[in-house]
Image (tube, coloured by chain):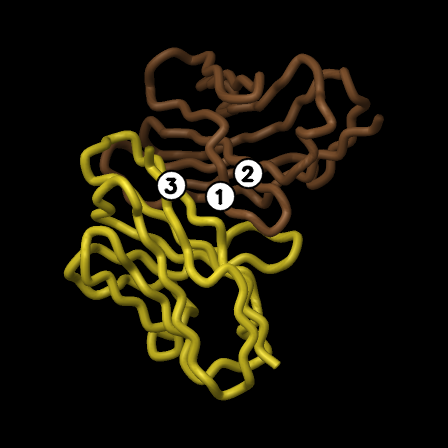
Chain colours: A yellow, B brown
Amino acid sequence: GAVVSQHPSRVICKSGTSVKIECRSLDFQATTMFWYRQFPKQSLMLMATSNEGSKATYEQGVEKDKFLINHASLTLSTLTVTSAHPEDSSFYICSARDGSRTDNEQFFGPGTRLTVL
Amino acid sequence: AQSVTQLGSHVSVSEGALVLLRCNYSSSVPPYLFWYVQYPNQGLQLLLKYTSAATLVKGINGFEAEFKKSETSFHLTKPSAHMSDAAEYFCAVSEGTGANNLFFGTGTRLTVIP
């Protein structure tokens, strides 16, 4: 149980295009989902937290107009990187919390490698 | 505010030797603590977690960790390293029931030498 999927696993796009990444909880209801960014050989940097049906809460320094997050259902959150540039190239990981649990555990997706040419 | 310090960005051990990965935390309330493992180009997998029950926590793949409040530590150990243990390990803390965020340490890369 508690499986989170991400799609796509890898994406290569041209500078200036937009890319959408999907994060799905497959067997539980994710009341809260998180989006992280990870640079090579570094830790995870929390970008934003989203609760189902609410606007996402962005961390300081993360451009909300650049990284659009939608959490329209209890099993799906999307991250759209708008007008992507090479500096947006990174590994993006989503995670989800099961609303029926109280242990704060987050279940992580397998990540999406974004390369912007 | 919460924070996590992982001492040693790289740890190398011989196959069959003890693995010890260090994690110290700061938290203003009783914390929940987690160890995650990440293999190359993959997401994070939970190894074990402490949520205010037994202070010695056993996880998957033979790993365990002990919560020591007096030392604000949650070090990860495994008696005998296996080649498949080579990966990146992250310690994380969250404050109390219902808290949303996890705060991650900077990670420790474990290398296992045959």
The type of residue carrying mark 2 is Phe
Q: What residue does disc 3 label?
A: A107
Residue B65 on image: x %, y %: 52, 19
Whether discs 3 and 2 lie on one chain: the answer is no
From the top left corner, tell me how far across and down residue B88 is, in percent. 63, 40
The residue drawn where x is 44% and y is 19% is B69
Check disc 3 and give the amino acid type.
Phe
| Circle on res. B104 | 1
Tell me residue B38's x, y (percent).
Answer: 57, 41
Kindly identify the residue that appears in the image at 46 percent across and 12 percent down. B56
Residue at mark 1: chain: B
Residue B90: give its label.
Answer: 2
Q: Secondary structure at mark 2?
A: strand
Q: Dot 3 falls on which chain?
A: A
Quick check: A67 above or below A99?
A: below
Mark 1 or mark 2, earlier in chain: 2
Above or below: residue B18 compared with residue B22: above
For discs 1 and 3, the disc positioned in front in the rendered view: 3
Quadrant containing the C terminus of chain A is bottom right
Please, which chain is the residue tagged with disc 2 on?
A: B
Tell me if A96 is positioned left or right of B61 in this view.
left
**Contact check, label 1 and label 2, Cβ < 8 Å:** yes
Badge 2 crowding class, 10 Å Cα cut-off, few under 14, some 14 to 19, many 20 or more, is: many
Q: Label 1 crowding class (10 Å Cα cut-off): few <14, some 14-19, many 20+?
A: many
Left or right of A70 in this view: A79: right
Task: Tell me which residue sits at (69%, 41%) in the image.
Answer: B9
* Outermost residue to the left: A53
Depth order, front residue of B75/B37: B37
Q: Is residue A89 left or right of residue A45?
A: right
Q: Secondary structure at mark 3?
A: strand
**Label 1 to label 2, Cα distance in Å?**
7 Å
